Structures are given as C-alpha cells and as structure tokens.
Image (cartoon, grey):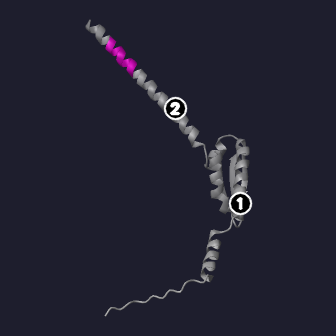
Amino acid sequence: MQEEIEQKSFNLMISTTKLSARTVMRAVKAAFRLYQSKASQGKQSVRTLLRQNRGVSSVEISKTGIRGLERYAKKYGIDYAIRKDTSEVPPRYLVFFKAPDAEAFNSAFKEYSASLLNKDKRPSVLAKLHELVQAAAELPGKVRHKEQERGL
C-alpha cells in the first residue's frame, strides 16, 4: 500500500515536471517568434536589411528631409536603412528599403514630397507676425496722459 502511494506521487511529480518544462518551452518559442517579428520592422542597419534575403532598393535624399521621410516610412510600415555617403561634398544620404515594400515606399515618398510642396506654399508665420506688428504700429492710437494726483 505504501509503495503504491509512493509510486503514484512519483508519477504525479514527473508529470508536473514535464508539463512545466513544456509550458516553459512554448513560452520561450512564442517570445522568440515575437522578437523576430518585431526586430525587423522600421529603421534598421543596412546589414540587417540585407540579411533578410530580399531585394534592396535605394533612393537619394537631402539631409533636411530625413526626419520627415522617417515619419511617413513609419506610417506605412516600411523597413528601411539610412546610410551617409561621405565621398562627396556635401555628403549625400541614401535610403535603402526592401524591394517588396516598393509600392508602399512609392506612396510614402509621394505623400512626403506633397507635404514638402505644401510646406513651401504656406506663408511663414513669422513673416505674418512682422506684418501685423508693422500694421499695428502705423495705426493712430489714443494718446494717454498719466497724471498722478498729489494729496495735500
């Protein structure tokens, strides 16, 4: 009787250990899959982009437009890498992206260039402010005389 109880408790202990080991392995595999899917999205190094074994294309862009382009690339979920080419003066910047993302990159680049054109068309806020200050200075204003009453 005692041996049977010991055998059953031993079997239960082994089953529990196997269950927890399987659970841990499943959790590790799920975390690894999640890490792999998150690691290769958005801005990354050229080496990481090339390691994905997909065609890579590039576009040249100016220094001033990098931040704006990054915003649109993030919006469209494009994997890209930015490389500075210092062989020329001024240096030029190349944006590398995966070939399957070509359509998404084209639409993001069109939206980015449209925003740049709209930005040039908009009047400067500082220029408007200076005009309003000059207009306010030219208006005839009330002349106020401040007099202090003296008590006796």
Which residue lies most toward the bottom here? 152
Q: Mark 2 points at which residue?
A: 30
Mark carried by residue 131: none
At horizontal 46% and vertical 24% (from top left) the residue drawn is 22
Q: Which residue is drawn at 66% across and 45% down?
A: 50
Q: Is residue 31 above or below residue 60?
A: above
On screen, residue 56 above or below 10: below
Q: Residues within 10 Å of mark 2 (few under 14, many from 20)?
A: few
The residue type indicated by label 1 comes to: Asn
Q: Which amino acid does label 2 sit on?
A: Ala
| Horizontal side, residue 152 vs residue 140: left or right | left
* Residue farthest toward the top in the current orientation of the protein: 1
**Callout 2: SS:** helix
Q: Which residue is drawn at 62% across and 57% down?
A: 67
Quadrant in the picture for residue 132: bottom right
Mark 2 and mark 1: Cα distance apart in space: 45 Å
Judge whether residue 79 can be spotted in this image: no
Magenta part of the chain: 8-16
Q: Which of marks 2 and 1 is nearer the N terminus?
A: 2
Q: Is residue 61 left or right of residue 45?
A: right
Is residue 123 in sight in this rendering?
yes
In this view, which residue lies farthest toward the front?
152
- Residue 32 rendering spot, x and y as whole percentages: 52, 35
Q: Give the residue number, with chain letter if any, for mark 1.
A: 118
**Crowd rating for badge 1 (residues with CA inside 10 Å; few <14, some 14–19, many 20+):** few
> Residue drawn 61% across and 73% down?
129
- Position of residue 60 measured from the top left corner of the image (x, y, whole percent): 72, 57
